[in-house]
Image (cartoon, grey):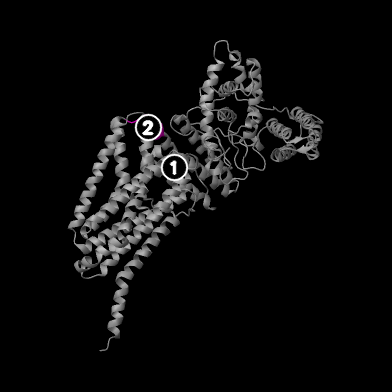
Amino acid sequence: MRHTSTRQIALALGLLGFAAPAAAQDIAQSSPADRAGAVISLIDLASSEYVDAVSDGRIINEAEYEEAYEFTEEALRRLAALPVSAYPGSDARAREASARLLPAIDARVDPGEFVSLAEVATDAIAAGWDAIRIRFAEDRPSARRGAVVYRINCAECHGDLGRGDGIEGEDLDPPPADLTAAERAREASLQRDFEVLSFGVPATAMEGWQDLLDLQERWDVVAYLQTLRFGAAEVAEGRSLALAPGAPVSGLIRSWSDPVEMAAWTDVDLATRVAELHQEDPEDSAIRGIVAYLRAQTGEPFDGVPELNADLEMTERFGTIDALLGSSLEAAAAGDRDAALADVMSAYLQFEALEPALGARDRGAVVRVEKEFADLRADLNSVSTTPDRAGVDSALAAAARTLAAERPSNLGLAIQSFVIILREGFEAILIIGAIIAFLIKTGRPEARRTVYAGVLAAVGASVAVAVLLQALFEVAPARREVLEGATMLVAVAVLFSVSYWLVSKLQHGRWEQYLKERMHVAVGAGGGLALGGVAFLAVFREGVETVLFYKALTAMAAGAILPIVLGFVVGLAALALIYMAFTRLGVRIPMRPFFAMTSGILYLMATIFAGAGIAELQEAGVVGITPLPGLPMLPGLGVYPTVETVAAQGLMIVLLLAALFVTFGLPRLKKSAEIAGAPG
């Protein structure tokens, strides 16, 4: 249900590393029987659409009429591509029978007549190529597994609850289907859902997943889809009714939830049969509850909507990454670099969903994976370079080992908690400390309130945004990269402007007189607000990520919260000591060097943010990547081996030189000109 051209295969994750992927075959490479089966399924879909589209020679549902036509066209296209049948005359019979379908749709024949024509065509195709109309997986479908596969591949368009409100579906026309819609009760069956999932819907963004998900995964998703039309309360009510002593349906639960026996039944079909047993109206709420319970048993039995399994999701995501990387190199080998880049980007976004959990354990592992992905995208951007995934595989295998490791000890949790808050807070403390020391030094300690207000606002905003975006990152993780990159670039502008404002004061010779006359006015007339804004951005830039890291660490701790709290408190104490030392040291420095030092710190942070901000946007696919071989990667300094990040930092150097020239060089030139022009 992801509306992108990506390949999805389950991961063979050996022990703690990557094993060779069990690659699913493309439709074009599958057996003739399977390809003929796809044609039959498309005709079956067209038939089911047509039945609800035409009555008495009139179109009563334009959308379903068009879909019937489009499904038939796609079926005929695929039929024409089938190899010659091994049975003499079968090709002609199948094609002749199928050729009657489009004219019948144009003529708006009676639905019963069209169904008969479709059956003749599908029977001929099945006989000609030994086609199986619908294949079932060896294992019973699992709605629990299906929930994970759905979340990874479908939720970005169809939404977490299947309501068609996913982030990536906002601009699609037609929009993604609402999988919870009431009309699905009479339209949706296991077979129909399987066929749509496998072969897609023509003239929509819904692509077929036959070559993306294996047979078991598709049936798992179909099992999960059955739960989306009902709530947990309905399932619970239906369970009590179905299992009550003497309940008429109790002996039929297994067969009436078996996907093989139930493949063609809709909810309405099932409700009719349940109502007949109970001698009730099919519309009765009790009957609906029993249907909800039976549908919930399509997969392995459970009560209500299945909960997500974190370990299973991790394995599925690594499987998706592995498959997408393989697809990318296949596309690159075929000369389609755009498709290759798209698949690599999709693979990276799958990794992004795992980043908070990995970053909470080993930030360096995150950086290594990001670097290898950047290098691979750079190789794909260069037609003279043969792309190699070995580096990405190695970094991902190490990440998988880290994530698969057992829960750290209490001491380990405390240390990780301490490192997270110290690492994420250090840059912010450096900036805030410089600002506070500046305010104290210039005799405006009361203006610290603005800075502290900015810090508190940033903390609150970080928590709120992290909570809000957590769900969005799971379906559209690139948005976090965009958010972080944009925040950094805004911070660059504010930091540089404040830095320049400070350095511009260095031209005044009489510092004490200037400060007494002007600093109160400068800070009170907007400078204080600007400094508060710097404090806000400094904290907010790190805050969202910090909250996500702690959320991941808490989940990993399995209830051991106290060590995390202790590590957090000790980390805050360490940051407080750094802050106090910085501010007190700053107050003792003479004014002119202090202004230069404060300006230099803010400028340095602006330069680091410039490189890091562009790198975040590159990871999100917003900015391109042009590699600079030989340049080291120093994330702590915002240095990345790409033309774009180096250019951003180079621009900061140019702006610094321009600021210094305007502040010092230009006045001297003017003074020299005045002296030269003065009469002797």
Q: On the image, numbered disc 1 is attached to which residue?
A: 469
Q: How many marks?
A: 2
Identified by mark 2, the residue type is: Met
> What residue is shown at x 59% (from left), y 17% (from top)?
254
Q: Quadrant of the N terminus?
A: top right
Q: In 3D space, how far apart are the residues under numbered discs 2 and 1 (Cα atoms)?
A: 20 Å
Closer to us: 579 or 446: 446
At 29% across and 43% down in the image, what residue appears? 422
Q: Which residue position holds label 2?
A: 556
Q: Residue 54 at what x, y percent from top left? A: 75, 36
Question: Would you say residue 139 is visible in this rendering?
Answer: no
Mark 2 / mark 1, whichever is N-terminal:
1
Q: Quadrant of the C terminus?
A: bottom left
Q: Is residue 656 left or right of residue 511?
A: right
Q: Which residues are magenta?
A: 401-408
Reply above or below: 97 against 505: above
Tag 2 secondary structure: helix
Out of 566 and 58, give the one closest to the viewer: 58
Q: Is residue 500 visible?
A: yes
Image location of residue 568, percent across then percent down: 29, 38
Q: Quadrant of residue 228?
A: top right
Given this view, does label 2 or label 1 mark the residue nearer the observer? 1
Q: Say above or below: 176 vs 112.
A: below
| Residue 3 part of the magenta segment | no
**Left or right of 659: which side holds 211?**
right
Residue 203 % position (x, y): 67, 43
Q: For label 2, count other residues whose C-alpha is less than 10 Å away and answer few (under 14), some (14-19) or many (20+).
A: some
Q: Which residue is outermost to the bottom? A: 680
Q: Secondary structure at mark 1?
A: helix
x, y percent for residue 119: 76, 29
Amino acid type at circle 1 is Leu
